[in-house]
Amino acid sequence: IDTLRADHLECYGYENIKTPNINRLAREGILFEYNIAQAPLTLPSHASILTGTYPLFHGVRDNGGFYLEQNHITIAETLKGLGFTTGAFVAAFVLDSRWGLDQGFDYYFDNFDLSKYKTISLDSVQRRGDEVLTEAYKWLEKNQQQKFFAWIHLYDPHTPYDPPEPYKTQYSDRLYRLYDGEIAYVDQLMGEFREFMEEKDLLDKTVIVFTSDHGESLGEHKESAHGFFIYDAAVRVPLIIRFPENKLGSKVIESQVKSIDIMPTVLNLLGEPIPESIQGESFLPLILGKEEKERPSAYSETYWPRYHYGWSELKSLRKGRFKFIDAPRPELYDVLEDPGEIDNIVNREAKLGHEMKRELESLIERYSAEGIEDAEPKKIDNDSLVKLQALGYIGSFHASSKEEGGELADPKDKIELYNEIKLAQFLVTEEKMEEAERKIKDVLNKDESVLEARYILGNIYLKQKKYDEAIKEYKKSLAVNPDYYDAIFGLARAYKRAENYDEAIVGFERMITIDSRDTKSYWHLGDIYLEKEEYDKALEYLKTCVEIDPEAPVFHNKLGAVYIKKEMYDLAEEEVKIALSFKRSVPLTNAHFNLALIHEARSEYDLAIMEYRKEQEISPHNFKPDFNLGLLYSKAKEIDKAIEEFQSCIEKNEEFAEAHSFLANAYMDSGKDLKKAEEMALKGLSLKPDKRTTILTHFVLADIYNRLKRYDKYEHHVAKANELKKNLDN
C-alpha cells in the first residue's frame, strides 16, 4: 500500500481510524512493530523491496531518470526460476515498466493512459485501488491452479487525498484527515480482497505480505508529504505477514526489521538459498522465536533535496532505540522516548553520535556498488561540446561540493523555501500562471541557486508563450548543472515552440546521450523532422519510440502520419488502426483525422467524410477536420456545406489564414455575397497564409473585383498573383 505510515493504522495503535480488515490480517498473522523503508520515495523503495538491496547498491535513488538495471535480480526473477508464474499490478506511473521493475514478471499491468492528464508528472498519473484489484482478480483466477507470485500495488493514500464516499465525508473534519479516509478505503478493498481469496479457496494456500514503500509526514517537521526528510513519519512502514492456516501463529515482533529483509525471508520460507548479492537478512528466525542476537541496523536515504534543489542528501542509521541522521547539522534521536523525533540529542550524546556516524559510514562503504557516489557525466566529443555550449545546453559547470566551497545546504534550513516551491508547482497545475510566477520569483529572490525554481520559472514562461524568457531561465539552470535533464528538455521544447528546430534538435539529441530509454526525446525529434519534411528521419525516431514502448497509441498514430506524408497509405492505415485498437479512457485524437486523409488520398470521399466527422466528435475544438471537410465539399460543388465548414473552422481558429481565403472562394463560387467574399479574402491575406494560398487569394480577389467592375483592383491582383506564381515556379 503506497504512502502508508505505520502509526496511522488501528492495529499499530492509531485511534482515529477504523481498519477492521487490516486488523484481522494482523490478528491472524505476524505484525512487525518497527519495519524501516530504505527510501521515502516510491521507485527507490520498491526497487529495494524487490531486490533485497539498498539504493546505494541498486542505484535507483529518485523517482524517474533512474532505472533498475538488468544485472539486478528481482524476487520475481528468482521465483519464476523456481516454477512460479508471476504477475504485477501497479497503480501509479512512477512504477511503470519503463523503469525496470518488470524484470521477472510474466504479466505486468501498467498500461497508463496518459492522454487524460493535462499535466503529466510521475506521481499524478495513478488509478484507484478497485481498478488494480479487478485486474489482479482476473489474473489470480486464471492462475489459481499454479504456484504464483503476485505483487499488488495500491496507491490510494498518496496525494491527492480524495477518497470515495462515505470516507470523504467521514474523514473531512480536520487537516490531513482525508489521508485517513484513503486508508479506510484501502481497508475496504482489503476486505474485498479477502472475500475473493476465500471464494477461490486461495486464502489458506497463500502467504500474504502486507507492507508499504514509505510513509507520509503530514506536516511533521513542516513537511506535508514525503521525499524530503527521513524521519520515521516517512520511513517507518507497516509489515504484516499472514501464513496459510495461521501455521506460524500470531504475534507482534518489536525487533526492528527492514524492507530489504522481505525478499530473503520469502526465499528462506521456501527453503531456497539466499543469493550473496542480497543485502537484507531473513527474519524467519524472529518469527520462529529462534533469534536472540541484535538485528542489523536499518539504513535509509533521500537524495531528493540534492537532485532537485542542490541541497544536501540525507542518510540515516536506526539502531535499537536510537536513530542518527547524517546531515550538515547531524541529528540523533531516542525514538523510543521521542517517536516524533523532536529532541535532537546529538550534542548531549556526542560519543554515541560519533559511534553511529562511523557505523553508518562503514555500512555505506560495505554495501555501496563500486563508483556509485562518483559517477561522472558521460563524455561528450569536442564538436558536440562546442555546439551544446553555443546553444546554452552546457554552461560552465561549478556545482557545489565540499571541495569547492563547504557543505551543501541542510534541508532542515530549506524546508520553508521547499514548501514555497511546492506551492508554486501547485499553482502551475491549477493554471494560475501569474500567481505562480510571483511565487517562484520570491523563491529565487531568497535563494537564486535553486535550480528547480529556475526550471519552474522556465516552464511558466513556456506556458505563457514567452519563449525567449523561458530559454534564458533554462540556460541559467544549465550553466550550473549541464546534466540537469529536465532543464535540457525544457530548453529543447522552448526552441521547438519558437520554431528554432535546429537548436531544438541539438537538445533532444543531448537528452538521448543522457537517457537513451526516454521516449520523450525521440518523439520530439520525430515530430520536428515531420515538420521539416525530412520523413525518413522522422520515421527513424518514431520507430524507436515504438520499440521502447510498443503499447503507446500516440506513437503508432504519429508513425501513420509520417507514412501519409510519404504516400505509403497501406502502412499508414496499419499504424493508425493499431493506435485505435488500444483501450483508452479518453479517445485518441487525430487518429480518425489520419484515416480520413488516407481515404481522401484513395478518392474514398464518403469514408473520408465519415472519419472527419468522427474526429469532430472526439476533438470538438480541433479546426483541421472542419477545414478539410470544407475543401472536400468545395470539390464536390456542395458550396453551402463548404461555407458551413469553413465558418466553423474560423470560429475555432480565427487566426487560420487559409480558412478565410477558402471561405472567400466559396462565397464567390456561390455568387451570393461578393462583399463578404472580399472581406474574407482580405482578412486571409492579412494573416499571411502560405505561398500557394496567397496566390489563390489574389486570384479570388481579382475575380471578385472583375464581377464588381472594379477593374483597377482586378488588374492589380491578377498581376500580383502572376508575379508570385512565377517566383514560386522558379
Image: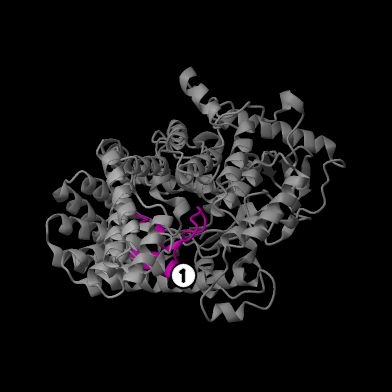
Residue 110, x across and y down, in percent: 37, 55
Front residue of 569 and 629: 629
Determine the image quadrant of residue 319.
Answer: top right
Residue occupying the point 66% across, 74% down:
16
Can you say which quadrant of the picture contains the C terminus? top left
Q: Is residue 410 visible?
A: yes
Rendering colour mode: one colour
- Left or right side of 627 for 368: right
- For label 1, the residue is 190
Determine the image quadrant of residue 436.
Answer: bottom right
Q: Is residue 115 shown in magenta?
A: yes
Residue occupying the point 54% across, 54% down:
463
Residue occupying the point 56% across, 29% down:
394
Residue 502, x across and y down, in percent: 43, 34
Residue 80, x across and y down, in percent: 31, 45
Label 1 is placed on what type of residue?
A: Met
Front residue of 655 and 90: 655
Q: Is residue 26 above or below residue 464?
A: below
Residue 387, x across and y down, in percent: 49, 25
Q: Which residues are magenta?
A: 108-136
